Amino acid sequence: MVFVIWDERYQAFRQKYQELSFHTVSQALQEKGGWNTIAGKPEWGLFKFGHTNPVQSNSGLMTIVLAAYSYQNKTNNLNLRDVVDVHFQSWMQELELGANGMSNSTGNMMKEMVLKGPSSFDALLVYESVAIDYLKNAEGRWGQIRVVYPEYNAWNENPYYVLNVPWSSSDQRKAADKFLNFLLTEPIQRESLNHGFRPANPNVPVKFPESPFVRYANYGIQVDLQKICEPPKAEVVTNLLASWQRWQVNR
């Protein structure tokens, strides 16, 4: 997951807060004067941060999970005590009441940001792959986008399932196996890199001159991550989602 923010606004944001993080995003959302208070830029309006709907989109769910990990300064064992803590609940509610967008699609939100520019969003939290796919398109319209990795991050692993069920024939399962083998071949894995996906085939390198992880390094794209958080237990996710839905009632 990565923050994407218009570079001009990122530079102004850093002047005020030194870093872009869940904590500083929350602070910026609470600034009653918006960008006028943040950077003396009243023409920029309020600070506008968005992420997808966590009930409808995995990246939105990842957003609130990573925000919880960040608040608790943990990379594992996020528990019920952490997410029902009154101080966390108050902080997270303020963050979520200030956030906007709440689309059911990460790609659609990023597309809107690129099409409409800073009038729609100053910053989003999206998949790394989505950011890479749109970097050059954004530059040709509204200027450069800066990519910033949250200190507390997580891998988005998308498993490939071959269904062993009564309504799936042996021929279909064999075809699914062959398709998986095709997807893991080096040419296809290299092609997936062009869209920001990290190769699942260990024989395919990430760092080489044509790789987006090299070409877009000046935008903030990087290979190595800081602190990787483990997936929380189902009961933790359920309570985070329940909290989020209650906060929406108060919007």
Image (spheres, rainbow, N blue to C red):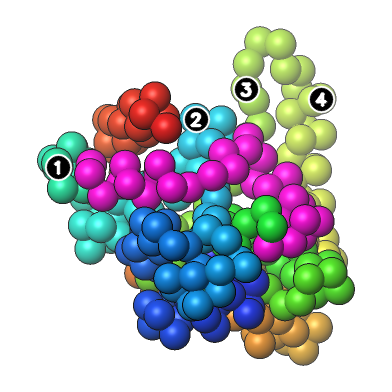
Residue 111 is a magenta residue: yes
Sequence-first tag of 2 and 1: 2
In percent of the image, x 25 and y 58: which residue is there? 71
Quarter of the rendering occupied by the C terminus: top left
- At label 2, the amino acid type is Val
Residue name at image x 75 percent, y 22 percent: 170
Range of magenta residues: 89-118
- Label 4: which residue? 171
Q: Which residue is mark 1?
A: 85
How many marks are shown on the rendered structure? 4
Residue identified by numbered label 3: 164
Q: Is residue 144 left or right of residue 55?
A: right
Q: In the figure, residue 24 lies in which quadrant? A: bottom left
Estimate the x, y position of residue 40 in percent, counting from the top left.
50, 77
**Residue 206 visible:** no
SS for dot 2: loop
Asked whether disc 4 touches disc 3, contact meaning CB atoms under 8 Å apart, the reply is: no
Q: Residue at 38%, 61% (x, y): give it.
A: 31
Q: Secondary structure at mark 4?
A: helix
How far apart are labels 1 and 3 at the CA level? 42 Å
